[in-house]
Each structure stands twice: as structure tokens, then as C-alpha cells.
Amino acid sequence: MTTTALIVAAGKGERLGGGLPKQYRLLGGKPVLRRAIEALIGHRAIDAVRVVIGPGQQDLAAAALAGLDVGRPIEGGAERADSVRAGLAQLSGDAVLVHDAARPFCPPAVIDRLLPPLEFFDGAAPVLAVGDTLARATDTLGEPVDRTGMVRVQTPQAFRLDALRAAYAAWSGDAPTDETTVARAAGLKVATVQGDTALEKITEPADFERAEQWLASRLV
Ligand code: CTP
Ligand code: MG
């Protein structure tokens, strides 16, 4: 089985703010995007890594990707799903691992867990149980939501390439935030594997601070 990792890095990072899109921000001296790639590129089950970048991000990407074997960056689109579609169109091989550049620390063990299920399933995704109370957000605290059996879904997400392409071709809903959403709508069977707190996405400023602290704690 040949597997390509597709890293989507074409976002603007508006919720993090600060001008520079978050995937190009330095985290412990390295761009977030570079960390996300380095976490995948050496894995023995990954044959190639490709990156999707935003229009106008060529110079930022060239600096962040210097010396990495990722081919030519692919130009993404306005929504994450547009970027994934653009990337999928350029790939070949049997399987794809779609991954957010905004998740810079992917443990190799997660990749080890994601690929074996592709023998029996169309896809596989890392998930974490929900530990906090869930409730609807309104002006004051809204109705509680039963968290029993609920999970948070992370990336990377592994798919048979032809199955994921077909699922995206069939998708007609609003902008999906990940591949499992598109895959389930198309009736694909997606296995779940244990996720990892190291895979938390950098979304808000507090996430970036947590990532910096986590990195610093690993260096001592
Ligand atoms: N992404 C992308 N193309 C887009 C939008 C997002 O490739 N048009 C990527 C981001 O670069 C990120 C991942 O999808 O690695 C997850 O998206 P998100 O966390 O929402 O990142 P941004 O869209 O950049 O952030 P924000 O929504 O706060 O602007
Ligand atoms: Mg976004």
C-alpha cells in the first residue's frame, strides 16, 4: 500500500490572530507547519508528503519548507474542504492521510494505529472521549447535552484515496471541517482509533501558549 500524507496549510488563522497565519508562526523556533510535516515525514508507512498552501503564501511556504522533501506546494482554496479537494486531485497511490498543519505534534503511534484499519474500512480517524460537561451556548448557559458516547475527532485521518475522492465528489453540504464528515455522508465506513492530546489543534491564542509550554516541558 502506498500512502501519501496531505497537509492542509492554506488557512488564514483568523481566530489565533496576530497577522501571520498560524501555520507560519514560530513554535520553539520552527514554523508550526514545519513541525507538522517533520512529525510525519520520517514515518516508515508514509511514502510521500504534500502540502496545500494559500494563494499568496508561496514565499512564506518556501521559507518554512526549506530542505524538506515535499514536492511543489499545491494551491488551496477559500474553505478547508476546497484545499483538501485541490490536494486530493494531485495525489496518486492507495491511501491518504489528511492532516491539519495546525496540529504540529503527531505521535508516530497514532499513524501506526490509523493505517491497519484500511484493510477492512474506508477510513480511520483518531478520537478522544469528551471529558467536560457539554451544553448549548446561549446568552446564559443553555441546555446540557448528553456526552455519553460522544468523541472529539482529530487529524490525521486515513482514507483509501479513491473512496475519499468519491466522497468529496458527492458532497453537497456546507463547508465540512474534516474528512470524516464527508466520508460518513457518502456512506463510507470509518474506524475510530485512540487519539492523543498531543494532537490538539492550535485554534485560539491559549492553544498556541499551551503548545509552547508543552514543547518547553519536553525539552527539559
Ligand atoms: N485550511 C486550509 N484551507 C482553508 C482553511 C483552512 O488548508 N481554506 C487548513 C488550515 O491551514 C489548518 C486546517 O485547515 O491547518 C484547520 O483549519 P483551521 O484550524 O480552521 O485553520 P484556519 O482556517 O487557518 O483558522 P481560522 O478558522 O481561525 O481562520
Ligand atoms: Mg478555519
Image (cartoon, rainbow, N blue to C red):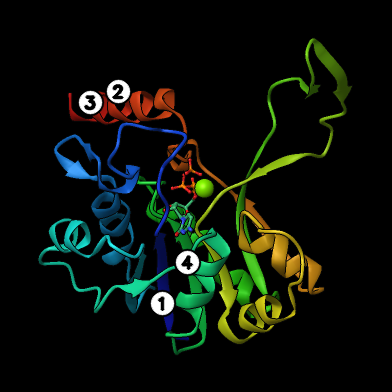
Q: Secondary structure at mark 1?
A: strand
- Residue 138 in the image: state x and y as whole percent: 79, 19
Q: Amino acid at mark 1?
A: Thr
Q: Secondary structure at mark 3?
A: helix
Q: Residues within 10 Å of mark 1 (few under 14, many from 20)?
A: many
- Residue 200 in the image: state x and y as whole percent: 48, 38
Measure how far apart labels 1 and 2 are at the Cα level. 31 Å
| Residues at discs 3 and 2 in contact (Cβ within 8 Å) | yes
Task: Mark 4 and ligand 1: say if the CB distance to the nearest ligand atom is below 8 Å.
Answer: yes
Task: Mark 3 and ligand 1: say if the CB distance to the nearest ligand atom is below 8 Å.
Answer: no
Q: Which residue is mark 2?
A: 213
Q: Amino acid at mark 3?
A: Ala
Task: Mark 1 and ligand 1: say if the CB distance to the nearest ligand atom is below 8 Å.
Answer: no
Q: Total number of numbered labels?
A: 4
Q: Amino acid at mark 4?
A: Gly
Q: Quadrant of the C terminus?
A: top left
Q: Which residue is mark 4?
A: 77
Residue at point 80% right, 22% down? Answer: 135
Measure how far apart labels 2 and 4 are at the Cα level. 32 Å
Residue 91 vs residue 141: left or right? Answer: left
Measure how far apart labels 4 and 1 are at the Cα level. 20 Å
**144 shown above or below 97:** above
Q: Secondary structure at mark 4?
A: loop
**196 shown above or below 138:** below
Q: Residues within 10 Å of mark 4 (few under 14, many from 20)?
A: some
Camera-side mark, 3 or 4: 4
Q: Which residue is mark 3?
A: 216
Instruction: Identify the mark nearer the N-term, 3 or 4.
Output: 4
Residue 137 vs residue 65: left or right? Answer: right
Q: Which residue is mark 1?
A: 4
